[in-house]
Amino acid sequence: MSEVKKIATRASYGNALVELGKKHEDVIVLDADLAAATQTGVFKKEFPERHIDCGIAECNMVGIGAGLATTGKVPFVSTFAMFAAGRAFEQVRNSVGYPKLNVKIGATHGGISVGEDGATHQCCEDFALMRSIPGMVVACPSDDIEAKALVEAAYEHKGPVYMRFGRLAVPVINDRPDYKFELGKGIVLREGKDLTIVANGLCVAPALEAAEKLAADGIDAKVINIHTIKPLDEDLIVAAAKETGKVVTVEEHSIIGGLGGAVCECLSEKAPVPVKRIGINDVFGESGPAAALLEKYGLDAEGIYKQIKAFA
Amino acid sequence: MNMEKLELQKIANEVRKGIVTAVHAAKAGHPGGSLSAADLFTYLYFEEMNIDPKDPQKPDRDRFVLSKGHTAPGLYSALANRGYFPVEDLKTLRHLGSYLQGHPDMKHIPGVDMSSGSLGQGISAAVGMALSAKLSNDSYRVYTLLGDGEIEEGQVWEAAMFAGHRKLDNLVVIVDNNGLQIDGPIEEVCSPYPIDKKFEAFNFHVINVADGNDMDQLKAAFDEARATKGMPTAIVMKTVKGKGVSFMENSVGWHGKAPNDEQYAQAMEDLEKAGEALCQK
C-alpha cells in the first residue's frame, strides 16, 4: 500500500490564496504577525504589496478588513482561530457581520491538534461563536483538496465567511474525479443503514475508519462530511436521520454549540432521533503531540469507534 | 465675517435643531456629544469633503466614519440637511421600523460609510479605507471622529499604530475633546490626557484646535491636515458638550438623555434665538 499523502489545511490555505491572488486583483491578505504559521507567507512572497501585516493586533486587523471591504477589496483576514473567533469576536460581529461586509476570515490552528502550545491556543469554541452571528458562513474542510475548494468558494460568495484550518498534516481523502464542493452542501462518503456519522475537518478521515471497524462488527454506518456548519445542509441530515434512525456527530470542537449543537438543533425540530455528540467534552485541552491529544480526547479512529459502538 | 463662515454657522444651527428634534422624538439618544460635534459635522459635509448626496456611493468620494457612533443624531442631522434624506425623517430616529437606527447603519442609511457604535471599532475601518486608497492609488480622503472617552479603548491605539506605521496621510482622525464621558469628567474616570502627545508618539501630525465649535479654527486645521504629507493627521479639538443648548452645555447628565417636551421647547428657543442672531450679522 502506498503512503497516504498528508498536508495541513493551513498550508492549503496559503497555497489557495496564491492561486486566488493570481486570478483576482482585489484579493488582499491580512495577517497579525503569524504569516509563517498561518502560511499566508507564501502569498506575501508572491504578492508583497497585497499582503498586509497588521502586527499583533487582531481586533484592529478585523476592522481594517471591514474598511477594505467597503471599498470593494476582498480581504482574507488571517490569524489563529483563538484570536479570530475569540479575541476579535465583537469586531467580527459588529464591524463585519452587522454590515454584512465581504470579509473572509482564515482561521488556522483550530482545535486541540494545535498540540504542544496547549489550552490557551487550542480553540474549540469557534464554530459556536461564529455560527451565532447572523449571515456568517462557517466552514471547516477535511483535507487539502477541500480546503482549496473552500477558499475559492469563499471568494465567490458575497458576504462574510469564517474558515477554520488546522495545523496538523492530515491525509488527503477527497482526491477522486467526482469530488464536488459546494458551500452548504454535505457530502455522503459512505452509505449505511444502521446509523449516520456526521463529521467535519480532520475528524472525517478517522470517522471513515471507524465506520469500517463498525462494519466488521455488523454495524452499517453512513458517513457524511458536513464541511459547512452554517448554513447547515438540513435536508441531507434530516433524510439521513429518518433513514438510519440514529446520528453521531464528530468534530474537533466543544460538544457545545458546534457541529453537534447545530445537528441537534436541526433534528430536534425536524426529525427527532437519538444523537451522540463526539467532540471536546466541555473541557480545556492541554500540551502534547497532536496525535496523542486526539487519542486522549477520543478523536482518533479507535476512540470514535468505541464511542459509537457504545451508542449504537 | 465672511459669508462662507456665516453660512456654515447657520447650517450648524439647523443641524443642532435636527439633533434635539430627533432625540426628543426618539425619547432617547445622545444629544451632548452630537451637539459638541455639530460644527464639525457641518464643516465636513458642507465644506471639506468631496461628496454628492445624489450619489452617496460614488467610488471616489471622501469617506467619513463616525467612530463615536452614539452621536448618530449629529451625523444624521448633517446628512439630512445636506440632502441625503428628508430632514422630516429625523423624527423617526430609533423608532421601530425606521431606517435611522440608534447607531449608524451603512446598510440602510444613505451617506453612512460604515456601521459603527461599538467604541474603538470605527477608527480601524477608517484606517482600512485609507489603506485601500493607498493600495489602489485612489485620491479620496478618509475622516473619522472619536470621542475623548472613546480613546480609552485599546483598539484605538492599535489602529493609530498601524496608521502611523503605514504613513496614511489620507487619514484624518478627529478627537472631540468635550471633556465628559458617561461616568463623569474624563480626567476623573480614566484620563486619556495628554491626547496630543499620545498621537504624536504614534507618528501622527497633531493639530490642537482651541475651539472646535469655531468654523475658522476648523478650516485652518483641515487645511493644514490636507497639506500634511507622509503621516496621518490627528485633530484634537476642544469643544463644549451640549453646545448651543444652554442647559445641556458642559453637563454630564446630557450625555445620553432625551429632553422632555418642556426642555425641548426651551432648547428650540435657544437655537431659534441663535439663528436669529446669525441672521442679524
Image: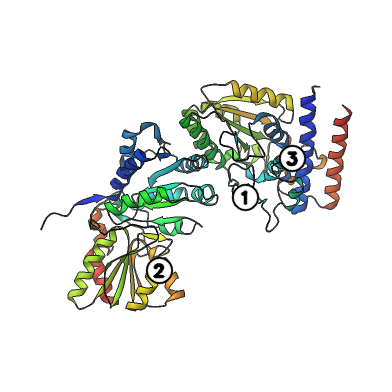
Q: Residue B199: in sight, yes or no?
A: yes
The image quarter in which residue A260 lies: bottom left
The amino acid on which the numbered mark 3 sits, given as a three-letter code, is Asn
Q: Marks 3 and 2: same chain?
A: no
Please state which of the two labelled residues, at mark 2 or mark 1, is closer to the viewer: 1
Query: Which residue is the site of mark 3?
Result: B81
Question: Label 3, label 1: how many angstroms apart (C-alpha)?
Answer: 18 Å
Given contact means CB atoms under 8 Å apart, are the residues at marks 3 and 2 in contact?
no
Element marked by disc 2: helix
**Secondary-structure class at tag 1:** loop
Give the residue number, with chain letter if any, for mark 1: B108
Q: CA distance from mark 2 to mark 1?
A: 34 Å
B222 in relation to B180, above or below: above
Picture layout, residue B13 above or below residue A238: above
- The vertical placement of B44 against B2, above or below, is below
Calculate the distance from the C-alpha at mark 3 to the C-alpha at mark 2.
51 Å
Spot occupied by residue A132 in the image (x, y as percentages of width and height): 48, 59
Above or below, comparing residue A98 to residue A298 in the picture? above
Chain of the residue where label 2 is placed in the rendered structure: A
Report the amino acid beneath label 1. His
Q: Using the image, tell me which numbered label, if any, was put on residue A263.
A: 2
* The N terminus of chain B sits in image quarter: top right
Residues behind callouts 3 and 1 on a single chain:
yes
**Side (left or right) of A220 relative to A256:** left
Q: Residues within 10 Å of mark 1 (few under 14, many from 20)?
A: some
- Pinpoint residue B150: horizontal percent, then vertical percent: 60, 40
* Residue B196: x %, y % from top left: 60, 27
For the C terminus of chain B, the quadrant is: top right
Viewed as shown, does residue B188 lie left or right of A233? right
Mark 3 or mark 2, whichever is nearer to me: 3
